[in-house]
Amino acid sequence: ALAFSPDSTTLASGGSEGELNLWAIPLGTHLAALQGHGHPVQAISWDVPGLRLASSADDGSVHVWDAVTRTSALAIEGHGALAAFVRFSPDGTLLASGGADYVTRVWDLGTGGQTPHAELRGHDGMVWAGEFDAAGARLVTASDDGSVRVWSAATGEALVNLHEHHGPVGGVACGPGGREVLSASSDTTACVC
């Protein structure tokens, strides 16, 4: 897993050793090794100001890290199996994670983040990706079941269920205006809805 900080001065990398490494860009100088995952890191996400990053791993664990002090700020054991994605809301108050348990969880970081703010259930396969819209009001998720779902980030209510693909959907994005959903599938199609 790889993710650049919002200002592109730091690269976070995670791999099979379960460690998150921070690198100074452009020189590639190693800044820190963040340890907390006992299993391979699957995904990394930075918050918008670049002060925190989140990571998820094969064992279902999710960590939030302080990028300034380079220490663990929060460890969440929310998924019973691989957590394939993590994503901060644009304002940094929510964190979404999803994976092999077919559930996306939304964590309220303002209340400590240990109990899910919402559990988004409805996919019939692994949840590979998730993305908040620009306002942070909606969360879009993509699954092995070929569907893309749009949820209310505040309530967890399912708003839209899209079945435009004939294979697993591994990527989603929200259009800049928040009205479009883009998805990509292993069936070799990309859709704009």
Image: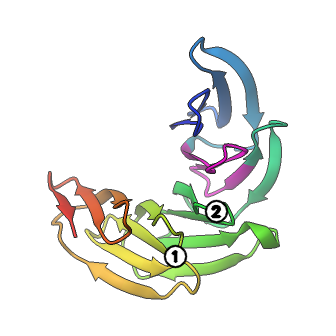
**Residue, disc 2:** 91
Viewport quadrant of the C terminus? bottom left
The answer to which quarter of the image holds residue 184 is bottom left
Q: Secondary structure at mark 2?
A: loop
Work out whether residue 113 can be spotted: no
Q: Residue at x 74, y 28 (%)?
A: 33
> Is 169 colored magenta in this rendering?
no
**Which of the two residues, 129 or 36, is positioned nearer the viewer here?**
129
The answer to which quarter of the image holds residue 115 is bottom right
As drawn, the residue found furthest toward the front would be: 177
**Which of the two residues, 77 or 105, is positioned nearer the viewer here?**
105
Amino acid marked by disc 2: Asp
User: Which numbered dot is residue 137?
Assistant: 1
Q: Residue at x 71, y 62 (%)?
A: 77
Residue 166 located left or right of residue 45: left
Residue 125 located left or right of residue 75: left
Amino acid marked by disc 1: Ala
Work out whether residue 75 can be spotted: yes
> Is 63 colored magenta in this rendering?
yes
Residue 31 to residue 113: above or below: above
Q: Which residues are magenta?
A: 42-64
Residue 149 located left or right of residue 1: left
